[in-house]
Image (cartoon, coloured by chain):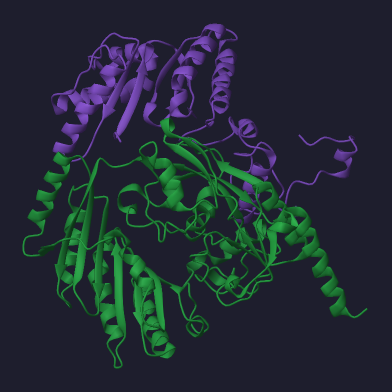
Chain colours: A green, B purple
Amino acid sequence: MSPSSSNTQQAEAAWDELAAVVGPEHVRPALPGDAVDGVPASRVIEPGTEETLARVLASANRAGLAVVPRGGGTKLDWGHPPRRADLVLSTTRLHRVLEHAWADLTATVEAGCSVARFQATLAEHGQRLALDPLWPERATIGGILATGDDGPLVARFGSLRDLIIGVTLALPDGTLAKSGGKVVKNVAGYDLPKLATGSFGTLAVITQAVFRLHPLPHETRTLTFTASPPAVEPLCELALAVQRSQLAFVALQVRAAGSGPSGLDVGFEGTGAGLDSQERAVLRLAAGVTRADPPPLVWRAREELWRGREPAVTAKFSVLPAELAEFCAMVREVAAPPPSLAWSLVAQAPGVGHLRLEAQTGDSLVVALARLRAGVERRGGTLALLRCPPDVKARLDVWGSPGDSLPLMRCVKAQLDPAGILNPGRFVGGI
Amino acid sequence: MPAAIEMMDSLAIQAAEAAVHAHYPECGGLLLVELDGPAAEVQALMTRVREICASCGAWEIRVAQSEEERAAVWKGRKAAFAAMGRISPNYIVQDGVIPRTALPQVMTEIERLSAQAGLRVANVFHAGDGNLHPLVLYDRRVEGQEGRAERLSFSILELCVKAGGSITGEHGVGEEKKAFMSVMFAEPDLDTMQRVRCAFDPERLSNPTKVFPRPRLCAERPGPYQPHPLETAGVAQFF
């Protein structure tokens, strides 16, 4: 028997084993649409319980199959393309809200539940998960956790890592491990919920999460101010003044673009009386800046950065709040050389934002991004490319400098996924 | 969401009064609720807090009328631990967490355990997040009392876990609580945490005996714990 036919037989045996674990009706050949950032997959598997999911992982691990966990599939093209994608492990069937302990302001939810459905369940008791990630109708809890996508409300309620209080992880060897708990204050053991958040499915598959919740607001109010380009500086100054004040805003964002007006949005929640007094205080700070009506869906403005002309890159940046105007100036500068690049950005307090750059060619994107990243990293910030044409990804590390923690990250990866089957290559430093 | 909700029971009130004269009422327990934010917002929400307290049967509702009065109320709360010296020669303070809805049931159970052990337990804690700090009062000079106090404080921890909570809310797991990690977590949970530990500290140099009930050798193959053949055969046991 030739080695290749022996390999084929082994692979077939592995698929048969997986079908037996999950049930043949929940395994299907992958379609072109299941490719992960251009890398074709072999099979899509949809386990119905976390125990089955863990067994699928264990089988894949034994067979050396590369596994790409997938929730709503909204962010599958973030990060490096995987080195291989034998098996897309879908959490579609793990979609239940397991417990809404509304009197305790906590909830337990399966990873495949969409953010919007989770929020709708919580709203039945006047509560919410106080964050506003991208594409909530399709994005799943597991997906936002793995990619660390939260949104403008971080200014008031903290990031995903502050809101998650418990997690269940399925490890490649089939271990199902819990960490954290169902209480809002807890320091027993290591905080694996925080470790899993933002790890891009490279350490384990998140099967369940427990969150602290907040009440839905009595009322909300958004104040919007505008400026004509290139005058984003007055808006950045006002944004800083609001952040330095005692105003209790819940969200704040600067919208800027190479062409078209810029905007500053400040969001408040509370009672009518409180909102009135805060609005007066903001207006006192905003003397000399033009007030405007907030555009529709203003707090979903960053979703616009995924739409437009190609080739384009959508990147995530972090800068110090006081250096936002400088960052905008750097973007303007790298986008200027003819042929000029179109750009737009949404920067949210306290200093994280998204940027879209459109160019005529991938080459000019690479040049502009490399210059911008060098400038940002020199100031201690970061620039990670999220959605990006393959030829740009091939020439530019999407993650940027990993700093000095890469060896440690590799050690963590080696402990939890020693065979390297989970999302191989997608994360920082090729993890 | 209030900025703070703190609870003190009658023993804690007595001790704090004796120490700092915060002018607390003589009562079975009191709740301190603090709101923060813009003045107009706080005023509107404080009305709501008063309504809720009244509907729950509060005997008396006081709103601090000055910064001095507010400071005195908080001074009493913050001094409560140290003030235990006024009513007991020794005490053990615990740190456990329960879901907020379990408070009435757990407080009743602590009272029962306290009576059973013949030792007083004062309660002063963060009610807003369910983080309990029961203070077990005892006298070290009385033979056997320290051991009983310790056992009582451990029973309270087990009570917290049984109620769906945690063995520590803010002070962590060192030597004393490491045995309780097995009460709260299953073996695969602990094993996964151990693997993370091995990534950071493969030589086991940092506090090697803390946090985990059973230390793991990082040179072991990563993955779930594999018993030694002698263990499987029942010849040897891992302590």
Q: Nearer the viewer, residue B170 or B204?
A: B170
Position of residue B27 measured from the top left corner of the image (x, y, whole percent): 31, 9
* Vertical placement of residue B186 versus A80, above or below: above
* Vertical placement of residue A133 versus A426, above or below: above
* Vertical placement of residue B101 versus A231, above or below: above
Q: Nearer the viewer, residue B208 or A45?
A: A45
* Vertical placement of residue A69 versus A360, above or below: above
Q: Tell me the quarter of the image containing the N terminus of chain A.
A: bottom right
In the rendered picture of this protein, how many numbered marks are placed on residues?
0
Position of residue A124 measured from the top left corner of the image (x, y, whole percent): 39, 38
Q: Quadrant of residue A38?
A: bottom right
Q: Quadrant of residue B214?
A: top right
Q: Tell me the quarter of the image containing the C terminus of chain A.
A: bottom right
Q: Residue at x 18, y 22 (%)?
A: B63
Horizontal arrangement in the rendering, residue A6 relative to residue A224 (left or right): right
Horizontal arrangement in the rendering, residue A19 relative to residue B229 (left or right): left
Q: Residue at x 80, y 69 (%)?
A: A11
Asked if residue A378 can be seen in this view, the reply is yes
Horizontal arrangement in the rendering, residue A97 relative to residue A120 (left or right): right
Position of residue A61 measured from the top left corner of the image (x, y, whole percent): 73, 61
Residue ranking furthest to the front: A25
Residue ranking furthest to the bottom: A338
Asked if residue B219 can be seen in this view, the reply is no
Q: Nearer the viewer, residue A278 or B159?
A: A278
Position of residue A225 measured from the top left corner of the image (x, y, whole percent): 15, 63
